[in-house]
Amino acid sequence: MITHCHMRFHFPPFLNGFTCFLVATLVAAGASHAAIDFNQEILPLIEGHCLKCHREAHEENGRMQKPKGDIRLDAAWALLKGKDDIVPIKPKDVAHSDMVRVVTLPRDDDMAMPPEGKGDPLTPAEIIKLKTWIIEGANFGGWEGNTRGKPAEAVKIAKAPAREREHDLLYAKLAAGLDPAAPDGLQKARDAGAQVAPLAPGSPLVRVDFLTGVTRCDDTAVAALAPISDRIAVLDLARTNITDAACKSIVQMPRLTRLDLRKTKITDAGIGQLAALQNLVAINLFGCEVTDKALSTLAELKSLREICLFETTATDAGVSKLKAALPKAEIVFQVDFTVAAEKAKAKKN
Ligand code: HEC
């Protein structure tokens, strides 16, 4: 059964907007707040819960104490750099910040931090604070911490993971032999409120969103994309006023790889029309009224690798079935960070 998932899904960095649903959740949870202050609100959490075991090697009672797991959390550079594939803090990317992962694991998990019996877990409110701070960009407010051991060169940008290379190959294949969209087609799309940009410099494939006026984007606006429909690879319709009728236009986009429908009125009936999108890699249905019925359509889309079903009415059983049909896909279903904390509480009592 899928009770929680660690949100290990990967978006190419140039599509960061796709992950915005996390921001939405936190904004909803936190209403309005000033930016989180690292020194006041985050550093005390790290000092109080983590540093005992995760600081620079030092002598204690005549014995050398190495940072546990070889992971230091006593400096900004160390929090950002991590060790091998463990990165405690990845600014703006809660899903890949291992500090968030380990503090939200069920308490009996071997990797739950602080380890069971070795310190109090963070409270749900503290976890929200941590996530919000990361989403806001993980600003350390000038704090550097312990600079001993800091590598001389700046933190190296990691090599593109396999997933991203896969994307590049797919886009190259989809763009082969395609001319750039005709200017009048582009103009029609822009007149309808769309922002259209090439996926990469010189690419005939485009990314389309309506971020300058999501509420003005409706089914008619999506229909106005028809002249460029075979060039659209990425379509962001999040929070727009589209309905299932827009899916008739969307399914006419044979090169569509990423589709963001979060927080729209799309239902099972709309998703049911999308089975012909044979290049679709990612779909975001966060906050849509879709059920397991939509999942059976998604199961037909063998190219899918990333599916967000957070806050839909899909069930554990439906998601399990989808997982079986699409074993390579990463499915985000429940990311409720209170779950782990509640479990921990229930256990203690
Ligand atoms: C009592 C000591 C102790 C405390 C306190 C502690 N840790 Fe750990 N931590 C460990 C040990 C031991 C490991 C190595 C576990 C292993 O590799 O089996 C570890 C490993 C980790 C890892 C690597 C996990 C992985 O998947 O390999 C991270 C990240 C981490 N800790 C973060 C934290 C954070 C964040 C805190 C504070 C909220 C914290 N730790 C508090 C002992 C501690």
Image (cartoon, rainbow, N blue to C red):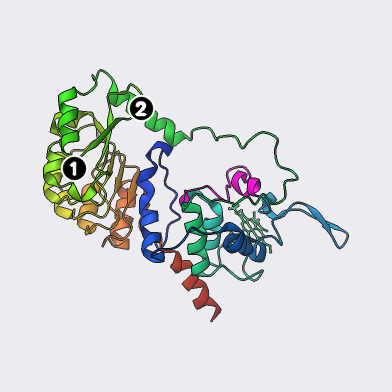
- The answer to whether the residue bearing label 2 lies less than 8 angstroms from the nearest atom of ligand 1 is no
Taking depth in this image into account, of 115 and 287 the one nearest to the observer is 287
Q: In the drawing, does residue 37 fall left or right of residue 263?
A: right
The answer to whether residue 173 is above or below residue 141 is above
The disc placed on residue 200 is 2
Q: Whole-percent x and y of residue 206? A: 27, 30
The disc placed on residue 275 is 1
**Disc 2 residue crowd, few under 14, some 14–19, many 20+, Cα 10 Å:** few
The disc placed on residue 56 is none
Name the dominant secondary structure of the magenta segment. Answer: loop
**Disc 1 residue crowd, few under 14, some 14–19, many 20+, Cα 10 Å:** some
> Amino acid type of disc 2?
Ala
Q: Residue at x 58, y 57 (%)?
A: 38
The answer to whether residue 95 is above or below residue 46 is above
First in sequence: mark 2 vs mark 1: 2
Q: Quadrant of the N terminus?
A: bottom left
Task: Note whether residue 328 is visible.
Answer: no
Taking depth in this image into account, of 256 and 46 the one nearest to the observer is 46
> Amino acid type of disc 1?
Ala
Start-end of magenta stretch: 76-95
Q: Whole-percent x and y of residue 168? A: 38, 28
